[in-house]
Each structure stands twice: as C-alpha cells, then as structure tokens.
Image (cartoon, grey):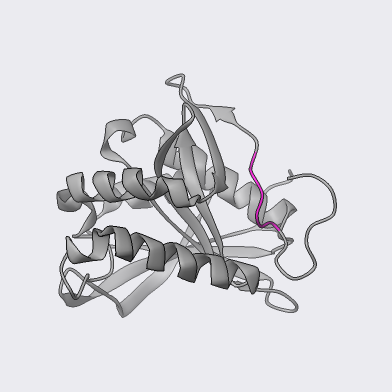
C-alpha cells in the first residue's frame, strides 16, 4: 500500500502493514488468491457451527456453498466487483497463513465517501485479538488508502462477540435495523454501528 492509489479502485489490490496482537500473533490483510481456496473451503466447513448462524442463508446448503466450484465463482465475483471499485476483498493472514476474510463493501465516493465492513475469523485463532486487529487494519485502509469518511457495520443482537470487536475499534451504535438480513433461514434484526474518520485524531 504505497504510492498513488488507483483512480478507479483505490486501495486494491494492496496489502496492509503487519501488526502484532497482545497475544503475539502477526496479522495483516492481503488480497485473496486463487490458492486460498483449499484453506477457505476446509476452514469454513469445519466452522459451520460458528458461521452458519451469523451469515446470510446458504440457500443450496452449507456444503454446496463450499465446493471448489463455489470458491472459484466466489473469487471471480469478488475480483470483478473489486476492479469496478465497489469492494475490497481481503484475506486475513495470521503468521503468514490464511485465517479468514475481511471485506470493505458498498464503497461509494463523492459526497457519501462510505463503505461497510464484514469479516469472519477461523476458529483456531478466535479469542486472540485477531478480529480486532483485522478490523483496525481495514479501518485504516479505508480511511487512508481508499479515502473514505464513514464505515458502517452490523451484527446480530445474539452475537455480542462481534459487537465487542467493533466497539473495541471505536464504532458507535446507531440503532436497530429490522429484518435487515436473511440469516440462518429467517429475516433477522441487526444492530448498526459506524465510525467516522473524524472520530480519531490519527
């Protein structure tokens, strides 16, 4: 992440700096690679019990959503949207290994200058500050490399751990979004939070 950002898709494809968590793990964000497919599929299948209750409904079933073909389609879609400047899809890398995803999505410039952030972290590194570090890196990237003013996020009321990750990064709760996303087979309410570049001096 050096030099002048790309005029159409600023901030992509770029790596973030690396930080070390309080637990001693090295964390950075980097563009997703085709070679991440096997780790992506294996980890998400193992973590179905963690992920399926909090992610948009997999209408064809969890296993069907995590085949090799599904990964290739997923990556193709993300790259196409990234080239259009609509999203920035990152891999979360811990100690040099794939450990989850973070996406800056719904990117708008001009008078809005905003995006949303979404993420998931593999279970072997849960509870070790990885999610907090990843969101912090994503925030810095959105504000400094993409040039945005506002980042929003949402989380389920019964998923307070995700809320704590966001609040630890300075997000503020704005309200409740009724029937916001179809999750685990039903339309679910979500808390919405946001952070502004002006909320912190640096």
| Image position, residue 197 (x, y; %) | 68, 56
Asked which quadrant contains residue 51, the reply is bottom left
| Image position, residue 59 (x, y; %) | 19, 75
Q: Quadrant of the N terminus?
A: top right
Image position of 197 (left or right of 153): right
- Please indicate, yes or no, whether residue 169 appears anywhere in the rendered image: no
| Image position, residue 200 (x, y; %) | 68, 48
**Which residue lies at the image location 50% right of the left edge and 50% below the top edge?**
33
Q: Look at the image and say whether residue 15 sits in the magenta stretch.
A: yes
Image position of 110 (left or right of 96): right
Looking at the image, residue 198 lies above or below residue 126: below
Q: Residue furthest top?
A: 24
Question: Which stretch appears magenta?
Answer: 11-16
Q: Residue furthest right?
A: 4
**Which residue lies at the image location 68% right of the left edge and 77% below the top edge?**
112
Q: Nearer the viewer, residue 190 or 73?
A: 73
């Amino acid at each position: 992440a050096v030099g002048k950002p790309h005029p159409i898709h600023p901030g992509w494809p770029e790596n973030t700096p690396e930080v070390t968590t309080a637990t001693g793990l090295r964390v950075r964000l980097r563009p997703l690679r085709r070679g991440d497919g096997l780790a992506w599929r294996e980890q998400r299948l193992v973590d179905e019990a963690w992920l399926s209750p909090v992610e948009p409904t997999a209408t064809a079933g969890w296993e069907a959503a995590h085949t090799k073909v599904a990964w290739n389609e997923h990556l193709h879609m993300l790259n196409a949207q990234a080239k259009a400047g609509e999203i920035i899809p990152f891999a979360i890398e811990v100690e040099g290994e794939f450990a989850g995803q973070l996406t800056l999505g719904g990117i708008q410039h001009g008078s809005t200058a905003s995006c949303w952030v979404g993420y998931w972290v593999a279970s072997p590194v849960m509870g070790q500050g990885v999610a907090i570090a990843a969101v912090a890196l994503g925030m810095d990237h959105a504000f400094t490399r993409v040039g945005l003013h506002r980042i929003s996020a949402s989380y389920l009321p019964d998923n307070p751990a995700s809320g704590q990750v966001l609040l630890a990064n300075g997000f503020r709760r704005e309200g409740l979004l009724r029937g916001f996303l179809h999750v685990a087979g039903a339309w679910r309410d979500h808390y919405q939070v946001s952070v502004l570049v002006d909320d912190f001096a640096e």
